[in-house]
Amino acid sequence: MADAAVLAGPSTQTLQWTKKDLLGLRELSAEEIRAILATAESFREISLRPIKKVPALRGRTVVNLFFEPSTRTRISFELAAKRLSADIINISASSSSLAKGETILDTIKNLEALKIDVVIIRHAASGVPHLLARHVSASVINAGDGAHEHPTQALLDLLTIQQKKGRLDGLRVSIIGDIAHSRVARSNIWGLMKLGAAVTVCGPPTLIPPHIEQLGVRATYDVKEAIREADVLMLLRIQHERQEAALVPSLREYRLRYGLDRERLKGAKPEVLIMHPGPINRGVEMDSSVADGPYSVILDQVTNGLAVRMAVLYLVAGTSKAEIPADE
Ligand code: CP
C-alpha cells in the first residue's frame, strides 16, 4: 500500500533514490529535497486512517540514539518507524555502555553486529553523524548535530510552508533569533534557498555569524524590517546550552528588542505564517498570544514531522530500487 502511494506521482519522470544516509540538506539537490517532500506528502494520509500502519519496513531494525534531550524528533522518529512496521530500539547514552567509556563508533559497530539497518543519531558535536556514516554500512540519519544541521526539521518546515502557501519559490522567509548556534537555521537556509525562497536572518549582532551573507542570505539587526518583508517568520530559541559566554545581556532584554508580541506582529504581512521548531521559550522569542494565535502553524510543523520522518526512513531503508516522484 505504501509502495503504491509513494510511487504514484504527478510526473512520469522518476528519480532513483541512491543515498544511504541523510546527513544534511547542504549535500542534497533541489530535486532530492522535492522528492522527499513528495514522498512525505503521500505518507501523511496513513496517520489519518483508523489503523495507522503499513508494512513498508517490515523486518527492518531502526535504532534511535540520542545524546541530547528531545521530545519532537525522538518521538516522531519512533512513531514513524512503528507506522512503517519496523522494529525500533531507543538507546540513551546515559543508560548504555557509552557511560562506561565505550566510544560511539564501538557502540555502533556492536549494534551493527546485531544487524541493524538504520541509526538515527542526535549529538552535541557537529560532524558525529558524518563520521559514523563513513564507518558503518547501516544508514545514518542526522537528528541534529551540534550547531551544524537538523535536516528533518528543515524538511518538515519546507513541507509546512509548501502546504500553507502552495509554493516555496519566490517567498521571503525571515529567521529571527540565535542564528549562530542554530542547526535549524543552517538546514533551513540550505533548503529554502535551493527551493527558490529568499532568506533574511535577524538577531542581535552577537548571535549572527560574521560573513553569513556568503551563504546567500541577507542579515539585519532590525527586527521590524525582518517582520515587515516576510511571508514566513521562523522564530528560534536562545540556545544557552551551546553558548560559551552570555551573548545577550538578559532574556528580558532579548524579548524587548527581538521578541514577537501582538504589537510587533501588527507590522507583518496579512497572511504571514508564524513558525517555531520548538521547544518554545514562551515570553522570550514569542508571546503566547502569537504562539497560539491564528497565524501560528507550530503544531502543523509537528504533524508534518511524522510524515517527513516516515519518508526519510522509507527512502534510506526501504526501497533502494524504488522509483520516487520527481520534478518535470
Ligand atoms: N525541534 C526539535 O528538534 O525539537 P526536539 O529537541 O524536542 O526534538
Image: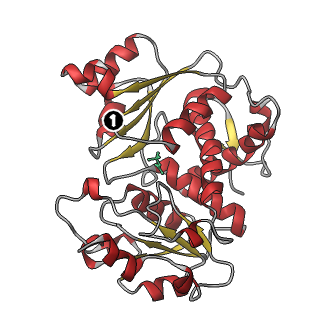
Tally of numbered discs: 1
Comparing 93 with 215, the one in front is 93
Question: Residue 93, how many percent across, how many down?
Answer: 32, 28
Q: Nearer the viewer, residue 117 or 262?
A: 262
> Going 82% across and 36% down the picture, which residue do you hit?
49
Tag 1 secondary structure = loop
Q: Which residue is the extreme one toward the top?
A: 114
* Above or below, comparing residue 241 to residue 60 in the picture: below
Q: Residue at x 48, y 70 (%)?
A: 286
Q: Which of the pair 253/55 is nearer the observer?
A: 253
- Identify which residue is drawn at 61% across, 47% down: 36
- Quadrant (top left, top right, bottom left, bottom right) of the C terminus: bottom right
Spot occupied by residue 308 in the image (x, y as percentages of width and height)? 61, 45
User: What residue would you read off at disc 1?
Assistant: 67
Viewer-closest of 35 and 312: 312
Q: Quadrant of residue 258?
A: bottom left
Q: Is residue 196 visible?
A: no
Name the spot of residue 280 as percent of width and height, x first: 47, 59
Whole-percent x, y for residue 98 in the image = 26, 23
Left or right: where does residue 258 sit relative to residue 79? left
Q: What residue type is disc 1 on?
A: Phe
Single out the residue that lies furthest toward the right: 50
Q: Quadrant of residue 124?
A: top left
Q: Say if residue 170 shows up in the picture.
A: yes
Q: Label 1: few (<14), some or many (≥20) within 10 Å?
A: some
Is 29 located above or below residue 128 in the figure?
below
Image quadrant assignment for residue 86: top right
Q: Quadrant of the N terminus?
A: top right
Tell me which residue sits at (68%, 79%) in the image: 271
Q: As displayed, is residue 148 above or below residue 124?
A: below
Q: Is residue 207 above or below residue 41?
A: below
